[in-house]
Amino acid sequence: MDWVDGVQVPDYVVTSDETLVGHRGGAVVRTGAAAEVVRHHGSLRLEAGASATIRSQQGSLHLDNALAFIVGSHQGSLHVSEGARVVVEGTQQGSVHVDRGGLVEVAPGGRMQGSLHVEGHVTNRGRRGGSVSGSGGVEDCDGGQVIPPVVRGSTTYYEW
């Protein structure tokens, strides 16, 4: 369930390959289905065995043993569960939580902006910035960059 204009609406369910364009509200991609997310405003959950290519999404993204490619922009929290994999070729803006057994790969040219809690593994070949916590691994390799914060007075931000 998600809220749209103050009204709770049921999740939209994707059961076969489908393109989401201009959808508002929650969506669930079922096992075996693939979604191309052209423009989506709301939460998106990928069940085990599902996949998605994200071109533009604003809202939380949760993967349960699923696969996602962020090729455009995702603005919102990202949760990567055990067995799930996310490849960031575009921009991820928001907090990222990677469970043990989960994997996030930032490709060359990709950017990950926001706090990062890692129990699984993150491989960065692009650019990332934000606080890091957890007992998992974060590997910056093959030209991967860590963007330091800029502190001006009491304000901390990142320049990309």
Image (cartoon, rainbow, N blue to C red):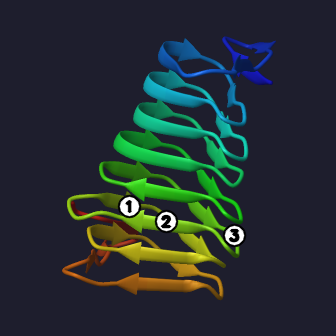
Question: Marks 1 and 2: in contact by CB < 8 Å?
Answer: yes
Which corner quadrant of the image does residue 150 belong to?
bottom left
Residue 143: mark in rendering: none
Label ID, residue 104: 2
Q: Depth-wise, is mark 2 or mark 1 nearer the camera?
A: 2
Spatial CA span between label 2 and label 1: 10 Å
Q: Position of residue 85 (x, y in %)?
A: 55, 59
Amino acid at dot 1: Met
Give the answer, above or below, for where 32 lies relative to 111.
Answer: above
The mark lying in front, picked from 3 and 1, is 3
* Disc 2 secondary structure class: strand
In the image, 144: left or right of 49? left
Q: Is residue 8 left or right of residue 133?
A: right
Circle on res. 112: 1
Mark 3 / mark 1, whichever is N-terminal: 3
Q: How would you rate the neighbour count of disc 2 (Cα within 10 Å): few for under 14, some for 14-19, many for 20 or more?
A: many
Packing grade of label 1 (10 A; few <14, some 14-19, many >=20) is: many
Between discs 2 and 3, the one toward the N terminus: 3
Q: Are marks 2 and 3 in contact (CB under 8 Å)?
A: no
Image quadrant containing the C terminus: bottom left
User: Which residue lies at the image location 64% right of the left edge and 83% below the top edge?
Assistant: 134
Distance from the alpha carbon under mark 2 to that under mark 3:
10 Å
Question: Quick check: 54 left or right of 9?
Answer: left
Q: Are marks 3 and 1 in contact (CB under 8 Å)?
A: no
On the image, which quarter does residue 29 sit in? top right
Give the residue number, with chain letter if any, for mark 3.
99
